[in-house]
Amino acid sequence: MGEGIVIGLAGAVTAADFAWPLRAVLSPALLLLLTGIVAPWCYLVVRAQRGSASQHTVAAWAFRIIALGLSFGFLGAKWWLLLRVVGNEPERYVGSSQSYGVALLTVLALGLLGSGLRFAELARLVADHPARLLALSFGATGLFGAFVLSLPMSMQRVNELSFVDNLFTAFSAVCVTGLSVNTIATTYTLFGQVVVCLLIQIGGLGIMALSAAIVMLSGLRMRVRSSAMLAEIVDSESISGLRRTVFAIVAYTLLIELAGATVLYQRFVELPEVRLVDGDPLAGPRSPEWAAIFHAVSAFCQAGFSNFEAGLPPLVGDPVVMTTILVLIVLGGIGFPVLDELVRHLGARLLRRRPERLTLHTRVVLGTSGILLAAMALAYGVLEWPRAFGPLSFGETLGAALFQSAASRSSGFNVVDVGAMRPATLLLTCLAMFIGGSPGSCAGGIKTTTLAVLFAGLRSELRGTAPRLLDRALRPETIRRAMGVSFLSIAIVSLGLFALLLVDQHEPLALAFEAFSAFSTAGLSTGITAELSVSGKLLIAVMMYVGRIGPLTLALALSGKVPQAAVRLPEERVLIG
């Protein structure tokens, strides 16, 4: 009953503050009342999580700390705004004050909900299901990131606060997409840029893998059930090999990003424009060190965010920057299993041992990725020579075509104006984004191996032979899984595009490009992302989220246990084609 009274009072005060914001006498009184309500709320949150929730002590306390921190942050933001408007124009901060009030009420409600036994039972139900746990982890991280990005310390101009825009940016970062409704360099402070970078890193590493690495480094032991679920999520061959798999993922990520950041720093330190606050296309990071770190993390994690005011187009003629980011994109897009196998293969050669033959998965990933990279580079060079690549020299055009070919399938960086491309090129780019990167990577899409398996299945049907890929036979369940992923992906993109066409009035091809880019977490745009309606932005955020966790994971998360059939049904023929 006490919880209901606290939330009811907080809701009434927030409603009054929302209706009459930043009034000379009323606002301080309402804020004092709201501050008094937060005190018993803190007591209720800390006191809760008893009974069955005791089995999740670490998770429970982590939730409490986050809820308390956000509540104090938004309450402090309300006081900061109230003091800031003294002597200024209050109407400029009305929207921000209302947003902070709604955000604080949301945190208070979630804090009490998350402290109840019903939520604990729901958490236990989710924790026993890997797909649901993965989906909930990305969703919760994106929502938490949106709250932090809305704090005054994260934004350069608080009067321009839009929680929907921050929610969009947070989900775009944690889903390593790169679509943005605002410019990172001019919207967020250094603290806000660090938050975006951390969200990218968390999304790229994988929330579960990162959590497991922290637990292992702290010396704690994971339960068998948790280890089994994590092994399934990170594609570890066994629970015994889980520790090596998790450490390999974290080590490869950090080492490659460190190497990329080092090379980029050597180049950025020669560019004085990077240190500018604003006014130059390369301004924004305020330091070459931060610019190098941000772009290295963004490139390897396939996010496509840049903290330069104009992004990467001003550096299209710089071979060091273009080559470094291109290598980071390629390495981040082939997947951790392939990286690990290539490292072990190279190590055997350096030690003059006979290396084991590359697995079918690695050969398919490398072959398909190479073919797509060359084909898209050729297509860009031929189709866009007089248009998007028109202002570039011959050498810059070759480099830009290769760079854009790699970026189009996963990372979302652009060095030319995508909106200036011809419709045929945009359609081809949609197909490239839909294919995406490779399994076990930070990239989205249906994956290169799915395309190869579908091609092998089609070839076997046309020839009337057993399905095979290179020199190996394929299992029927592999083909069925590839068909399932492709069908679900097409259905999700089609449904999302249909909804976008209903709520937005932009050109259909431009909206289709946004839908493919969001679902495939590619991050490319024709330039309409910031012009989308609120409904359109929320739809794109949902598509980014679904694309990051994967259509099959979403289907498994929403489904329950399928009962075994008690009888075997008779078979009958259905005509096809």
Image (cartoon, rainbow, N blue to C red):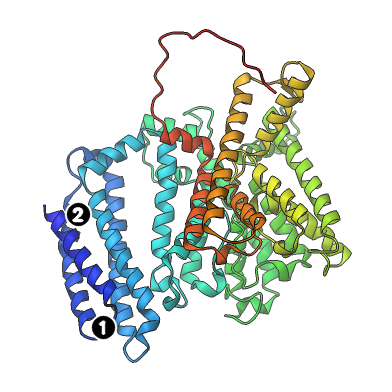
Name the residue beneath numbered marker 2.
Answer: 46
- Residue at image position (70%, 23%) is 577
Question: Could you tell me residue 194's position as x and y percent?
Answer: 49, 65
Check disc 1 and give the amino acid type.
Answer: Arg
* Circle 2: element type: helix
Camera-nearest residue between 536 and 292: 536
Mark closest to the chain's N terminus, 2 or 1 = 1
Whether residues under marks 2 and 1 lie with C-beta atoms below 8 angstroms apart, the answer is: no
Left of 176 or right of it: where is 101? left
Question: Could you tell me residue 540's position as x and y percent?
Answer: 52, 54
Relative height, residue 153 to residue 331 (above, below): below
Left of 176 or right of it: where is 402? right
Q: Can residue 148 be seen in this view?
A: yes
Name the residue beneath numbered marker 1.
Answer: 23
Q: In which quarter of the image is residue 38?
A: bottom left
Q: Is residue 198 visible?
A: no
Relative height, residue 487 to residue 425 (above, below): above
Q: In which quarter of the image is residue 96?
A: bottom left
Check disc 2 and give the amino acid type.
Answer: Val
